């Protein structure tokens, strides 16, 4: 909800989902910790610079051994 209010849409590329499946997390807490450490820390930087006037889509990918977040025009805005 916070992302949407900030003018951001979030999309997960198949590469990051494949990467997440390589982990053997034993419980929900381990999954949350992994996502917080690897993805949410990067999203925080994008939220700090976001605003309702900036309609962007953030695409979370895994490339070259690390999580990468790419910015592009908001997909709903492009469709119009």
Image: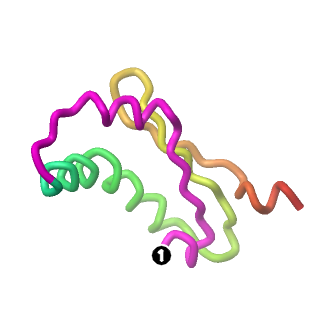
Query: Which one is in front, 54 or 1?
Result: 1
Q: Residue furthest top?
A: 64
Magenta run includes residue 13:
yes
Residue 2 picture location, percent across and down:
47, 75
Residue 15 picture location, percent across and down:
46, 30
Which residue has dot 1 on it? 2
Q: Which quadrant holds residue 51?
A: bottom right
Identify the residue at image location x=28%, y=50%: 35
Q: Is residue 7 above or below residue 14?
A: below
Identify the residue at image location x=57%, y=78%: 5
Identify the residue at image location x=54%, y=56%: 10
Residue 66 picture location, percent across and down:
35, 30
Which quadrant, please, contains the C terminus?
bottom right
Query: Which one is in front, 26 or 19?
Result: 26
> Which secondary structure, mark 1?
helix
Left or right, 58 with reference to 53: left
Q: Which residues are magenta?
A: 1-27
Magenta run includes residue 79:
no
Identify the residue at image location x=59%, y=64%: 8
């Amino acid at each position: 909800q916070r992302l949407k209010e900030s003018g951001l849409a979030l999309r997960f590329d198949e590469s990051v989902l494949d990467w997440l499946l390589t982990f053997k997390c034993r419980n929900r807490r381990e999954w949350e910790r992994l996502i917080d450490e690897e993805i949410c820390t990067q999203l925080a930087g994008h939220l700090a610079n976001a605003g309702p006037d900036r309609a962007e889509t953030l695409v979370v990918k895994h490339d070259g051994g690390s999580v990468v977040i790419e910015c592009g025009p908001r997909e709903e805005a492009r469709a119009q």
